[in-house]
Image (cartoon, grey):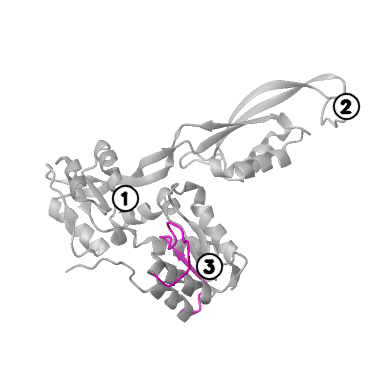
Amino acid sequence: MQLKISELIQCIEAFASPKYQESYDNSGLLVGDRNQVIDKVLLSIDVTESIVEEAVAIGAGMIIAHHPIIFKGLKRLTPDNYVQRTVISAIKNNVAIYAAHTNMDAVMAGVNMQLAEKLGLRDLSVLQPVSGMLKKLYCFVPELHLAAFRDAVFATGAGGIGNYSDCSFNVAGYGTFLAGENTNPFVGKQGELHAEPETKVEIIFPEHLQKQVVKAVRQNHPYEEPAYDIIKLENSWEQLGIGLIGELKKPMTENELLDLVKNKLGTPTLRFTKANKITFRKIAVCGGAGAFLINPAKCAGADAFITGDVKYHEFFDAENRMMIIDAGHYETEQFTKDLFYRVITKIFPNFAVQISNRNTNPVNYY
């Protein structure tokens, strides 16, 4: 089976929109032509010269990685460092490179869900939800066209609240208008004031769906000039954000929890703080560098917080109220390759998707 690179990009971005990435990030297509046709993709956490070599060896025309190889920007392409050499090698061998980084962290079913499930956590919720990324549509629709209109807007992905879909609020009323010259009114006549029974429809949607929502409004509203408003909401979006918090099936002692983390993540050495607790049940997680979530995890009542890249002084922030476990950056994100695999094969079950067998973790343990 062959696919355009753009089709694979659409598949990933339907799961984790690039609009969700942090402002400092550089997710997206970094090397290559989105119109190129390929028949195999390689999945990895990082992109290195070795990963490009692996892609060439197996005939993969694209690498999908979690970490962007181009992060701070390139001012030249010379073989002076591993980033530039990797990009040069990819270009020479016609291998595209795509990254889905903090947008893959932000979706609830993303990187942190993989980590939480490996540790057996349940009753999960987002540790630090985002705000300001939701909008609301207000539209005024004739009653006979209401059901079809709502269905068309819902089909864009709008109307989701938590695990509920097709959510709307509807208020009956009537609208008035006077059709002027050069109009073709759906109801009423030119030059006459008209009152029409209408329903005010309210539907919430993620900000990145606005173009699709407006298109659905215009294509499925019977009026020549549909009346609608879109406003930005400051509500927290409980399905989107950084980190997750949940509970173990049963409480664990300190040693039991540390053994669980070591065994499930394969980390040979853990760095951790002590806590004034006998058992641990409520656990917060953040794959990668998550020290900025120490205080939110503590405020959420977590007994332990599992992440990577914790600095010396940041461990003091636990204040003996919570155990901080630094299990390693790579180790807490390693399952992202499996996530990419599931996302792609769900849509393209017959496409060749291969998970890299090379460990790109630059950290070694002695």
In which quarter of the view is residue 269 placed? bottom left
Looking at the image, is mark 1 or mark 3 nearer the viewer? 1
N-terminal of the pair, mark 1 or mark 3, is: 1
At x 46%, y 32%, the residue is: 235
Residue 347: in sight, yes or no? Answer: yes
Magenta region includes residue 277: no
User: Callout 1, which amino acid?
Assistant: Cys
Q: Is residue 184 left or right of residue 324?
A: right
Taking the view exactly as shown, the residue that stands out farthest to the bottom is: 57
Residue 108: in sight, yes or no? Answer: no
Q: Position of residue 107 (x, y in %)?
A: 43, 49
Graded by Cα atoms within 10 Å as few (under 14), some (14 to 19) or many (20 or more), the crowding at tag 3 reads: few
* Quadrant containing the C terminus in the rendered view: bottom left
Q: Position of residue 166 (x, y in %)?
A: 56, 40
Kindly report the distance in space between the C-alpha atoms of the residues bearing marks 3 and 2. Answer: 55 Å
Magenta segment: 58-80
The residue identified by callout 2 is 181
The residue identified by callout 1 is 286
User: Callout 2, which amino acid?
Assistant: Glu
Q: Is residue 275 left or right of residue 57?
A: left
The residue identified by callout 3 is 349
At x 44%, y 68%, the residue is: 84
